[in-house]
Image (cartoon, rainbow, N blue to C red):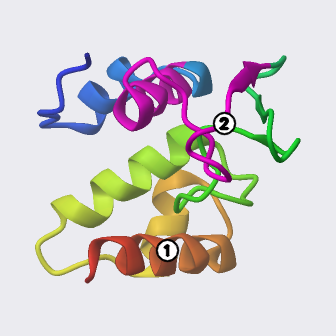
Amino acid sequence: MINTDFNTIIDLLNAFPDDQSCINHLEELRWSGQVISPFDADSKVYKCANNRYRCKETGKYFNVKTATLFDNTKVKLQKWFLAIWLVTSHKKGISSIQLSKDIGVTQKTAWFMLQRIRNCFGF
């Protein structure tokens, strides 16, 4: 398990140097080694290529991002983790313009990310 006390952005980037480390961390947090289908909790799950899984009962494919705030987005998980850290570490919040500059996305993408983060955390 990764230390969750990040004091700086450097600590966060060292803990999550690539998308695969982010995926591994999310899988451990979400499933703790026992993958459960978001479509049918009692169904058997098959591991497929590219960090995907398949629900036996429904036949649907899913991954660790399915049914989370990261669902249906092409933004890398490392940028999501950075955005979450920045939003939660700023005392008075952060604007979408500032977030877009900090993580290297467009302002429209940053606004979308902020909406999901705020919705998830109840800000």
Q: Quadrant location of residue 49?
A: top right
* Local secondary structure at mark 1: helix
CA gap between label 1 and label 2 equals 29 Å
Query: Which residue is located at x 45 percent, y 67 percent?
Result: 99
Relative to 87, is 14 above or below? above
Q: Answer whether residue 23 is magenta in the image.
A: yes
- Which residue is label 2 attached to? 43
Question: Which amino acid type is shown beneath numbered disc 1?
Answer: Arg
- Which residue is label 1 attached to? 116
Question: Which amino acid type is shown beneath numbered disc 2?
Answer: Ser
Relative to 25, is 62 above or below? below
Query: Which residue is located at x 31 percent, y 31 percent?
Result: 12
Whole-percent x, y for residue 56 in the image: 80, 33
Whole-percent x, y for residue 123 in the image: 25, 83
Query: Which residue is located at x 22 percent, y 62 percent?
Result: 88
The number of numbered badges drawn on the structure is 2
Between 115 and 93, which is closer to the camera in this rendering? 115
Q: Which residues are magenta?
A: 21-47
Query: Which residue is located at x 76 percent, y 52 percent?
Result: 74
Between 61 and 73, which is closer to the camera in this rendering? 61
In the image, taking residue 66 as reference, residue 48 lies left or right, namely: right
